[in-house]
Amino acid sequence: MTALDPATVVAPERDGARLAVLSHRFEAIVRRMSNTLARSGRSGVLNTARDFSCCILTAEGGVLMTGQSPPIHVMGGPDLQAASMNEFYPELHAGDAFLHNSPYHGNTHAADHSILVPVVDADGVHRFTVLAKAHQADCGNSVPTTYMASALDVYEEGALIFPVVRVQKDYEDCADILRMCEMRIRVPHQWRGDYLAILGSARIGERALLQLAEEVGWDELETFSREWLDYSEERMEAAIRALPAGAATASTHHDPFPRVPDGVPLRVSVTVSPEHGMIEVDLRDNPDCVPSGLNLSEASSRTAALIGVFNSIDGTVPHNQGSFRRVRVHLRENCVVGIPRHPASCSVATTNLANRVGNIVQRAMADIGDGMGMAEVGSGMSPSEAVVSGRDHRFGGGPFVNQIFTGPNGGAGGPSTDGWLTMSDLGSGGTLLLDSVEIDELKQPILIHRREIAPDTEGAGRHRGAPGLDVEYGPLGTALEAIYANDGSINPMAGARGGWSGAPSGQFKRDRDGELVRLDICGPAQIDEGERIVARTSGGGGYGDPATRDPLAVARDVREGWVTPARAREVYRVAVDVSGEIDESATRALRR
């Protein structure tokens, strides 16, 4: 959809032109913050994949502007983080900066290091808060990964937890906190570089807001903030009023996992009330927290539900605290997709179950009415997105730890479009970049042997899901440990409204003789020199009956090599040869 200009869609009493201009000014500030982080981050997870987010919050903590950020970072959590900061530090001062990664105080999971900086005017009044959040290659876990899915609890997980800890005062570092991190993190120089990048990003945002206030005045910015959130709520209310009324329940099942041998069944109830302009999402009827790192933090539970809702409605509605007011997410304490109690581990809270929750929300929305909702996106973290570690003998045998993004899961089909090939998962929303093979091979002692689309793995539908990928890599001159937390190899990604499921994921080791051996769904996997790890990512689910897909679209997929002629005939009821030439009479007969 084409984004609507606030200057043309506002209440009569508001100055639409002013609202449009200032919203773009705030968005530009967030973009400056993001550019700073991308260019100065040291680990590949930041400067290559861009697994980070930046946003501006009101003084009260409401999400005001998010820019292009992974939605799992910025939709349902920053307000919780700001609330903890305001609670712990009732008096905030210019020059303060706080490190926050606690999943029990509003953060997503321990691997996402956030810096919060209060923007304080010359009179000492707290006006806004800027937040920069960046996923870490290592956060002090007991094993070299930031995703420890097998952790019994937060103690076995081992991450350093910072529940809104002041790391700068009067613009000077609190060196004791930094020394603590450097003693526990395996690649301290890399972490220090990333810390400076996150802090620099937040300070850029602070400086830009101070300059903007000097230009237009604090009162003008306060008025804008209030009106921007009200405008966004009105847009969201209008979008919901255009939907059909209804309620639906959807369910799913995460694959068996360490310490969770039966997997995790999940269900959600979604109610759309156009009359009241509200959507309700109820996640309370789900299991208690499990002895695993799969548990969602409150931020991840809320955000996953919001992602499923926003994927199902008018895509031009702004994502901020105003539009969030029109969605009620019901959670309960000590629930695996609710509000965890310390010391439940939330190490994997931004991926597996979060994606499963968002998937069933948008699938429930599809059940309520054709033309909205989506099918399911791949939910697990395949070995193609593993945290790899070992010793790099090219540079003196020093340790390396980094997350690679060599192959994403396939995106879901929707009511008007096919699935996005490089979607990765719902939490990233397609914002993470696919790694360059050459850069990955420069940064780590690995060789990526192949990365290619796997034919016939898409979830068939009127709008098909994206196919999965095959990725194969191995170490050079060393041994490699790959830690991952996959899902979807037993319970693949479901379709919606008659669409088919995508093909399941898989993980294997290719031994020195070339034989494939299936690996556990959850790493670590030890890959010695001469061996390779082979990953098949999940195909996305399809939307609608495959036999109603446009034959020209089927022919295009065959020409591209994504779908074979046999599958085109058997599933889509289209007779087409390998060159993409359609036999129209045979196709009519098949579709009768």
Image (spheres, grey):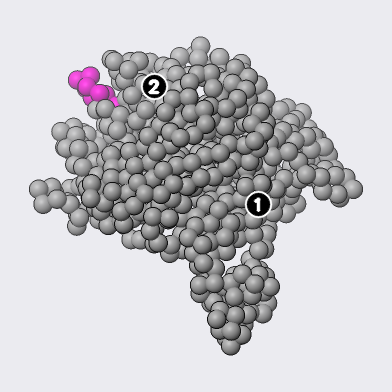
Q: Quadrant of residue 145?
A: top right
Give the numbered dot on residue 504: 1
- Measured as percent of width and height from the top left, residue 164 is found at 42, 19
- Measured as percent of width and height from the top left, residue 357 is found at 48, 42
What residue did someone put label 2 on?
97
Amino acid at dot 2: Ala
Q: Residue furthest top?
A: 176
Residue 67, magenta (yes or no): no
10 Å crowding of disc 2: few (<14), some (14-19), many (20+) = many
Q: CA distance from mark 2 to mark 1?
A: 44 Å
- Measured as percent of width and height from the top left, residue 476 is found at 79, 41
Could you tell me which residue is drawn at 27 percent across and 32 percent down? 58
Q: Which residues are magenta?
A: 119-126
In the image, 538 versus 579, the foreground residue is 538
Q: Quadrant of residue 123?
A: top left
Which quadrant: the C terminus?
Answer: bottom right
10 Å crowding of disc 1: few (<14), some (14-19), many (20+) = many
In the image, 286 versus 21, the foreground residue is 286
Could you tell me which residue is drawn at 57 percent across and 51 percent down? 493
Q: Is residue 391 left or right of residue 18?
A: right
Q: Residue furthest right?
A: 513
Q: Work out whether 576 lies above or below 127.
A: below
Q: What secondary structure predominates along the stretch shown in magenta? A: loop
Which quadrant: the N terminus?
Answer: bottom left
Q: Is residue 64 left or right of residue 466?
A: left
